[in-house]
Image (cartoon, rainbow, N blue to C red):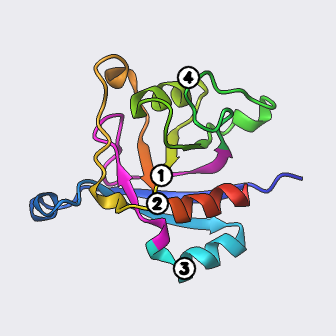
Amino acid sequence: QKIKMKIFYLFALLSLATLISGNFFQGDLKIVYPMELKENYRQNEQDYRTSIATFGENPWGRKVFGNLTLAKPLDACSFIQQDSEEEFLEHPILVAMRGNCTFSMKGHYAQLAGAKMLLIVDNKDESIEKILMIEDKVLGEAVNIPLIMMTKAGGNRIINSL
């Protein structure tokens, strides 16, 4: 039986002072299931820091809630395969790894697969708050779902839990 992971993501636009300091767009992630990962998140919240893309539909001040599903292929750089229709009935939050194509392309393929949000796991140990995910000129304007990037440490824990 496949365990579904549920998360909340509250979108918040930070102040101009925060923007100037280098922290661009941030939100508040809450893992609600499975319990082991929820507890790990509570104890290591700094490992689950995120950054929000400057493009896509970001529902500021609202929550996105859903089940996490791994993108197949994991880099989300081509059409995303579905194991079953049931897997995508709830318009999941897809999880993909950074690399191999633009953020816009990943968002485009996630959107085509029916995702309501894309969580991109960083492939480097770096300060996630200073990464600015910008759109490319070809696909950026066509992406209408939120894109979130998470640190490598927290993202890998999520991937291993799926």
Disc 4 marks which amino acid? Answer: Leu
Task: Measure the C-alpha gap from mark 2 to mark 3.
Answer: 15 Å
Provide the residue span drawn in magenta: 47-69
- Report helix, strand or loop for mark 2: loop
Give the class, few, some or many, for how many residues have Cα within 10 Å of label 1's Cα (few <14, many ≥20).
many
Instruction: Kindly identify which numbered label has been placed on residue 112.
Output: 4
- Report helix, strand or loop for mark 3: helix
- In the rendered structure, which disc, 2 or 1, sits on the residue that comes first in sequence? 1
- In the rendered structure, which disc, 4 or 2, sits on the residue that comes first in sequence? 4
Q: Quadrant of the C terminus?
A: bottom right
Disc 2 marks which amino acid? Answer: Thr
Q: Are marks 4 and 1 in contact (CB under 8 Å)?
A: no
Give the class, few, some or many, for how many residues have Cα within 10 Å of label 4's Cα (few <14, many ≥20).
few
Q: Are marks 4 and 2 in contact (CB under 8 Å)?
A: no
> Which residue position is annotated with label 2?
151
Q: Is residue 145 above or below residue 2?
A: above
